[in-house]
Amino acid sequence: MGFCISCGQPLPISQVDEGLYLRGIELFNRGEFYAAHEVLEDVWRPTSGAERLFLQGLIQVAVALHHHSTGNLAGARSLLARASRNLREFPETYLGIKLAGFRESLVDWRIALENNSPLPAFPRLEVVRGGLTPEC
């Protein structure tokens, strides 16, 4: 059992393998989307509940960006839409990731793909100082 860093209340222990998780984030931020999705799937498999849904959303973004790199624009659009739905209910920070800017970036990508407009910079996963330290 972990404890919230803000209020001290007990929290369930995360099911996430922190080392693999951080490796997946690193690969994602380097633009190695296929490799990132493979590593994040290894993190995702043993999880359940909210952690599982969150990781599924990150994996969907990685696969969407991989699809884009191979010219599969329909697959990229579809997966970005699903990822956005999966990630929308999470707080501003979840599992050590700042989500506000990331979600905005996904919207920008979806709009650009829908309109055949120039694409923005790739989304980045910004790790919050303290990483996976539990918080309410």
Image (tube, rainbow, N blue to C red):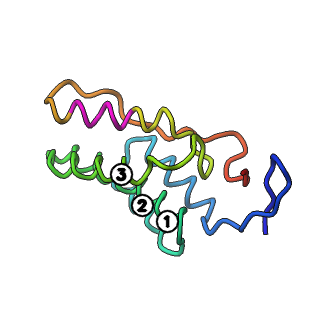
Q: Which residue is mark 2?
A: 56
Task: Tell me which numbered mark, 3 or 2, is placed earlier along the sequence.
Answer: 2
Residue at 29% across / 45% down in the picture? Answer: 65
Q: Residues within 10 Å of mark 2 (few under 14, many from 20)?
A: many
Residue at 79% across / 69% down in the picture? Answer: 1
Q: Is residue 26 left or right of residue 13?
A: left
Q: Which mark is residue 52?
A: 1
From the viewer's perspective, is residue 21 above or below residue 32? below
Residue 2 picture location, percent across and down: 79, 63
Q: Disc 2 to disc 1, how far (Cα)?
A: 6 Å
Kindly state the secondary structure of the residue where label 3 is placed: helix
Residue 131 picture location, percent across and down: 67, 48
Residue extent of the magenta highlight:
105-112
Q: Residues within 10 Å of mark 1 (few under 14, many from 20)?
A: some
Query: Mark 2–mark 1 contact, CB under 8 Å?
Result: yes
Task: Tell me which numbered mark, 3 or 1, is placed earlier along the sequence.
Answer: 1
Q: Disc 3 to disc 1, how far (Cα)?
A: 13 Å
The stretch drawn in magenta includes residue 120: no
Residue 59 picture location, percent across and down: 39, 57
Q: Which residue is mark 3?
A: 83
